[in-house]
Amino acid sequence: MDPNRKPLIAGNWKMHMTAREAADLAAAINKGLDPDLKHDVLLAPSFTGLHAVRAALSGSKIFLSSQDVAWEEKGAFTGAVAPSQLLDAGCSHAIIGHSERRKIFLETDEVINKKVKAALKAGLLPVLCIGETLEERESQKTYRVLETQLTGAYAGIPAADAAKCVIAYEPVWAIGTGKTATPEQAQDAHTFVRKQMERLYGRDFAAAVRILYGGSVKADNVDELMAQPDIDGALVGGESLKADKFLRVIHSACQHAGHGLARIARRSSALAPRAYDARSSEAVLLS
Ligand code: PGA
């Protein structure tokens, strides 16, 4: 990773745990964090766990995220949760476009684009997930898929807003399968993603945007992945469901976190809720 980009380790808890269990896990992770940790940590429980996890993280600098968000602000949308409701529940971020949402819930790039816009409008920071299936990789379509997903997700979004997004590259064939992309495969995809961001928003933007890797990340592979120049963190599923395992991932990821971070950390005086402005490497308060 580049020392000018602040690493982010995110835990996606998917459809696991009661609110109480989620709060206990959040508290255990918070308690076990190295107080000198220089990178960002984010937890994404189910909607039903958000309030309890927020309470468990009171005073902590861990960010809270939803796993999805509705694109409408309010109204007759049974089962959906609006951006303003997520802010009210304590979220600073929203995961959008996870491959499970794309595949199981049939979300298109158009829907994902609407969700990214709605989240940004409300002041939530999107963690935008992209990634190719095994079939697409084997038929040499990885780049085309990533280009289409990125172009679709960012359609009509100005650079100032797009800068508030984090991207998570998650090859679908690596999610929950125990098959991690090799550091070289991941770096190759991340380089491509960064080039696409340069095409969309220019070189300075691309140099600053944070791109996480996701897909079977564990303590014994996270450091090697994050040693790659374009990998700025990880979106972790299964391995984030146990405090000791996730803490090992978080702290193993420190190894390559680098010296430049001290400078970034000094600038980031505000604790949660806050947004990370990728362009300027400044932490800014959410209004
Ligand atoms: P995994 O999930 O770490 O269990 O592969 C990652 C994700 O889906 O975000």
Image: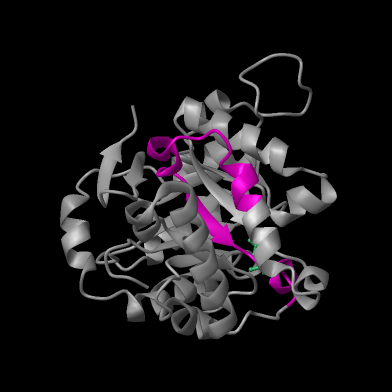
Image x and y of residue 84, in percent: 53, 24
Q: Is residue 252 left or right of residue 246?
A: left
Image x and y of residue 198, in percent: 44, 56
Q: How many marks?
A: 0
Q: Is residue 42 visible?
A: no
Foreground of the two, 135 or 275: 135
Foreground of the two, 39 or 105: 105
Residue visible at 41% across and 42% down in the picture: 164
Foreground of the two, 286 or 194: 194
Image x and y of residue 15, in percent: 72, 51
Residue visible at 57% across and 49% down in the picture: 128
Q: Is residue 181 left or right of residue 200?
A: right
The image shows residue 216, relative to residue 43, as above or below, that is: below
The image shows residue 70, relative to residue 4, as above or below, that is: above
Q: Is residue 208 visible?
A: yes
Residue visible at 65% across and 66% down in the picture: 143
| Start-end of magenta stretch | 149-177
Asked which quadrant contains residue 209, the reply is bottom left
Asked which quadrant contains residue 204, the reply is bottom left
Residue 265 lies in the magenta stretch: no
As drawn, the residue found furthest toward the top would be: 75
* Quadrant in the picture for the N terminus: bottom left
Residue 154 lies in the magenta stretch: yes
Asked which quadrant contains residue 192, the reply is bottom right
Q: Is residue 173 left or right of residue 193?
A: right
| Ligand 1 image-quadrant field | bottom right
Image x and y of residue 163, in percent: 40, 44
**What colouring method underlies this structural image?**
one colour
* Quadrant in the picture for the C terminus: top left
